Amino acid sequence: QAVNLVASNILPGIAEQQAAQARLRSLAQIEEMIQAERYDEAQALLRDFQALYPDDAEAAAFLAPLADGQARQTLYERAVALHEANDLTAAQLAYQQVQASWPEYRARDVQARLEQIADRQQLMLLFAEGEASARAGRCEEALAKLQTVRGRDVNFQRSQLEQYLADCN
């Protein structure tokens, strides 16, 4: 009779309590993955969780932050890839979009990358102006610009730069 009492009254309560604790652990794990920007893992956990608890309001509350985080991360990673591929204008636009949409997201890194792009674009413009001056025979003007380029980045268009400098000396 004691066994029946335990089986019918106590065990279901323990099982319910364990299920509730497992639910809370899963929710905490999903939140932790989102905070750690591990969005693919968070999405998989959330999908599994919603299969078990389809109408859970707490789980539904993670959908917006998850989507926002994925969008932010995707745009940032795209900007970095464009930057690494030397597509500076597209990278600049993508970083500016990250900065406008999520001002606090990797703020120092995004700003530093925007400054690198602006510096590189300025260097490219200065080189183009120096090159045009050299080709037009305006050597004094060309030397000033090309020497500035070399002073800022000794490896920038090095062989062409050295040739233009040699031609003007």
Image (tube, helix red, strand yellow):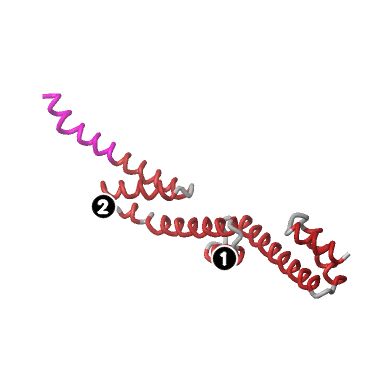
Of badges 2 and 1, the one in the foreground is 1
Residue 75 lies, in percent from the top left, at: 50, 60
Q: Tell me if mark 1 has few (under 14), some (14-19) or many (20+) residues whose alpha carbon lies within 10 angstroms of its own.
A: some
Q: Earlier in the sequence, mark 2 or mark 1?
A: 2
| Residue type at tag 2 | Pro
> Residues in magenta?
1-19
Q: Is residue 8 magenta?
A: yes
Query: Which residue matches tag 2?
Result: 54
Residue 122 lies, in percent from the top left, at: 72, 66
Q: To which quarter of the image does residue 23 belong?
A: top left
Write the residue at 63% across / 56% down. Answer: 108
Q: Tell me if mark 2 has few (under 14), some (14-19) or many (20+) residues whose alpha carbon lies within 10 angstroms of its own.
A: few
What main secondary structure does the magenta stretch of the protein show? helix
Nearest the camera: 62 or 127? 127
Relative to 5, is 116 on the left or the right?
right
Write the residue at 64% across / 58% down. Answer: 113
Relative to 133, is 8 on the left or the right?
left
